[in-house]
Structure formats: C-alpha cells, structure tokens
Amino acid sequence: MSFSRIYSVIIYLFFTVILSACSMLPTDFEQIESKAYTDTGQTWLGETASQLQVENTEHSSMYLIAEGTDAFLTRMALLSKAERSVDVQYFIWKADIIGKLLMHKMLEVADKGVRVRLLLDDLSLDNKTKKILFAMDHHEFIEVRIYNPFSSSGYKAPAALTDTSRINRRMHNKSFTVDSQYTIVGGRNIEENYFSANERSNYADLDIIAVGPVVAEVNEQFDIYFNSPLAIPGYVFDDHKFQKNSLEEVKQALADYVLSVKNSDYAQDLKNSAMYQRIESGLAGNNKERIYQGKAHVIYDSPAKTLGKSELETTYMLSMLRPHVDKINQSLELISPYFVPGDEGTKHLIALVNKGIKVRVITNSLASTDGIMAQSGYARQRYELLQGGVELYELKPRAKSKASRSLSRSAEAKSALHAKTYIFDRKEVYIGSFNFDPRSAKINTELGVVCEIPEMAEYIATELFDKNIKQAAYQVTLQDDEVVWLDKVNGKVIVHDVQPETSWWRRFNLSLYSILPIESQL
C-alpha cells in the first residue's frame, strides 16, 4: 500500500472517530422531571432546623465551616440523619478517601429508602469514579445525572476538538442539601485536598451550612439544573450498562474500603477535631456562638449560560453581584484564589479607590497556586492595581490552619487558597463558587449565597484581614516603583524582589503565559 493510501486511511479513520464520538452525544432520551421534597418538616433535621428558626422564620440561620475536617464531618453528620432526600451538585468528585466515604454513606441511606440525587459536571469525572457512580445509579433510590457531558461514549478528546464552544462551559456550582432542611454551599469540591486529608497539599476554603428560607432557594436552583436538558441521566451512557450487575460488588468494595481507613491518620485527625466532639455530644456540630441569623439570598447563573446565551439573554450571577458592589461606601474586601481582574476589572477597582473606598484582595501567591495560567492574568495587572491604591496580599504556601494536621506529616506540604468570599462594607458577604475572573463571569456557571448579616461580614473580615494577614500572606507593594513582597517572619519583615519560594522555571512559565492571548479563558 502506498504512503498516500495509508495517509488517506488514517485521515478517514481519524475523522470517523471524531464524528462518531460527537454523534454519540445523548439527545434522544426521556427527561423525567424531578423535584425537591417540600414536606420534610417532621424529619429529625426538620425539627432541629425549626428550633433554630423560632425567633424569625423569615431569616435563615447559618454556620461557617472553615476547617476541612469540620467540612467533611458536617456532610457525614447530615447524611447519617437523612430520612427523605439527599441532593448533591459538584464540579469535581474524586473516588479518593473523601469521595468513597461519602458514596458509601449515600448507599447506606439509599438502602433505607432515602432518595439520592447526584448532579456532577463531566469535565473531571474519571473512569474510576464513573464506574462507582454508574453502579450506584442502578440503585432504586439513587439517580445520577452528568452535566454537559463530552459524549455518551466517554471519549472526551474528539468532542473537545469539534464542539469546543459547548465543552468549554462547565458547571462550577457546589451544593449539598439533606431532607430539604439543611444545605451546605461554598467553594469545596469533593476531593481530599479540600478536606484537610492530603499530606502534600490542602486548600483553605469556606462553606456555610444553613437552614431556613435559603434552603428552598438552593432547592429551586438544584431542580433547575437537575431538570435541565444539559443534565444527562446516567443510564444514557455506554458505560452504564456494564455496571448493571455490579451494585452489590461496589457496595462491598466501598464497605471494605471504609474498614481499611478506620484507623488511618485522617480518621484520627477527624476524631481529634472539636467538631467531632460536638457531634459525639449530640450538639450536631453547632457552636451556638457562631450561628448567624438574618436575610440570605441564593444567586446563580442560569444553565442557559452553558449554551452560550449572553448576559442580555439569560441570568448571570455577575449581574446579581453588581448591585452589592455599586452601593459600597467604605470597603470592598475580596478573597479569590484565581484573581484575574482584566483591564475592565482593574479600572473598576481603582475607580472605587478613587472614591475613597478601601479595596483589599487576598489571592494565591505564585508559590501556593495550582493555576499558573490564572496567576499570569493577575500578574499582568498587579503593578497597575498597586499604583491605583488596591491593597494586595498573596497566601504563603506554608500557611497552615490548626486543623490541617495532615500537612504536618510531609516536609513538602503546602497550602493554597480556594475560598471565594466577597465582603461589602462589612455589612454583607458573598460565599460561594464565583472566582474574580473571566471564566466565572462569562463562561462557567456558578452558585453562591449573599448574607445580609453585618456580624458575619465583620467576623470574616476581621479573621481574614485584620488578625494574622501578614503572618499568613505576603503583602505585595511598590518600592522604588518596583513590585516587592513583604514577608513577616518572627516579627521581622523580609523584602523579596522576586516572588518568594518559587523556582526560576516556575517564574519563567508565569512570564510565558503572561504574553499569551488567553486572558478571556482564565
């Protein structure tokens, strides 16, 4: 066979695979509508929620969850009390120690007749996780839907090449709701480094657990996404049928895994936490001094954003955040791991400073970030932001919380920022999944809660900005018209003229990405 003939066959096979993969994108399935339960007031969680709502049923009650161990225990505690329903929505779900323990617990409650609905974005789902999920989907009381899948065949590369516009848009929302009474919303995905379980890398993040009217709003959001044409039922996928008879096998494998980690280091970390002690004492993990009550509103993008609908055509979270920014009089404090303000955002933040408003930002340093590309977008604007009076702080990679015990077991361990929290005049605070970057603003869908509770806003701002900011983060400033990093160590201030704790190779990559025209995708 001639070379040209071989070449023609290869080209033919290449395009055949691509086109067949794209044609396997599921479209001809029956979308069965599913709604959150509303008659759950008599459940155990319903009764405990009503006790928190005695004073004002129009307000929501919220508890902040900053530590990873507390965040995991709270989810497990809610699952253990589930009687009617579990509704879970995430961007990332990994079958590691966190994902497996949660899936095992979900199977346990489903065996008791609790309805479990799982909605997960397809981008980060690996075959290991999908195998378990599709087996779970064969359970009578579990329904798995995959959001905006690449294809029903599981081949992602062909779809990514031929349907880039759709595939580029992901569901970044994160919610965890049990019995339509308690909900958890925040920045965490389901993976060990979000829950202080990784010995080499952990994220500093923030969730809120809430009861009251805000839960119904989260339910409404979940139903809209779960019933969206973009939420594809698990049974449509080719790999689903291969798990038809593996449910019991998966149950046993997860049960064996739970036993295998019963005496693990992470299990001991959990038992040593204050949250575990409160749960064991029957207090459901709540420290009453930290429960905040007041008005709270859920804001989120419409799923139509995934289809490329513009801000003029459908609901964008960005438009819901604008009124809170526009009425600021004194301060705007931003916590965003991926801070990419761009030209427009930079001008807006500087304009606020020129009005006499204090603008302060905490983001990752080059040493702590897991996203150098996003860091490159921020680095392009850093000098202009500083010159315009915006205060910048970058998290140190060695900053550790008291509950990050896993990090003490590895000399190479580092911390990274992942919380997305915006504080307006210390009167209102947003907590959710929205990064201050173009991807959150214009590409991905996001979810969060705006709490009109000054006590909560003041507490978060004080903890993050006022108390130990210079110990936990480098202060970035200008000296002799050059960007420098101030590092406070043992009461002394060290001045760095290059980004601290980074190699020349990492800095080179940052510089390389900074000249590429990729900012709109960051």
Image (tube, rainbow, N blue to C red):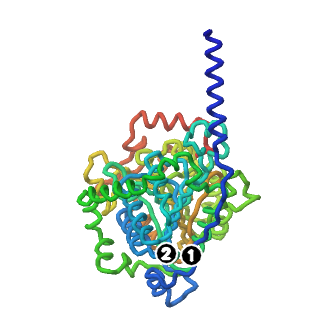
Q: Give me the residue at 70% from left, 62% from top.
A: 315
Q: Is residue 166 visible?
A: yes
Q: Give me the residue at 62% from left, 45% from top.
A: 167
| Residue sitting nearer the eye, 346 or 80 | 80
- Residue 37 badge: 1
Which quarter of the figure is the N terminus placed in? top right
Q: Earlier in the sequence, mark 1 or mark 2?
A: 1
| Residue sitting nearer the eye, 140 or 81 | 140
Q: Where does residue 54 sit, x and y in percent of width and height?
A: 49, 90
Q: Where does residue 260 sit, x and y in percent of width and height?
A: 26, 56
Residue with the most extreme bottom position: 55
| Residue ID for mark 2 | 84
Q: Amino acid at mark 1?
A: Tyr
Residue with the most extreme top position: 2
- Residue 160 badge: none
Q: Give me the residue at 54% from left, 88% from top.
A: 56
Q: Where does residue 239 sit, x and y in percent of width and height?
A: 52, 46
176 lies above or below 305: below
262 horizontally vs 43: left or right: left
Quarter location, residue 272 = bottom left
Residue with the most extreme front position: 245
Q: Where does residue 17 sit, x and y in percent of width and height?
A: 62, 32
Q: Is residue 399 visible?
A: no
Q: Residues within 10 Å of mark 1 (few under 14, many from 20)?
A: some
Q: Residues within 10 Å of mark 2 (few under 14, many from 20)?
A: many
119 horizontally vs 264: left or right: right
Quarter location, residue 98 = bottom left
- Kindly check if marks 1 and 2 are in contact, taking CB atoms under 8 A apart as contact: yes
Q: Amino acid at mark 2?
A: Arg
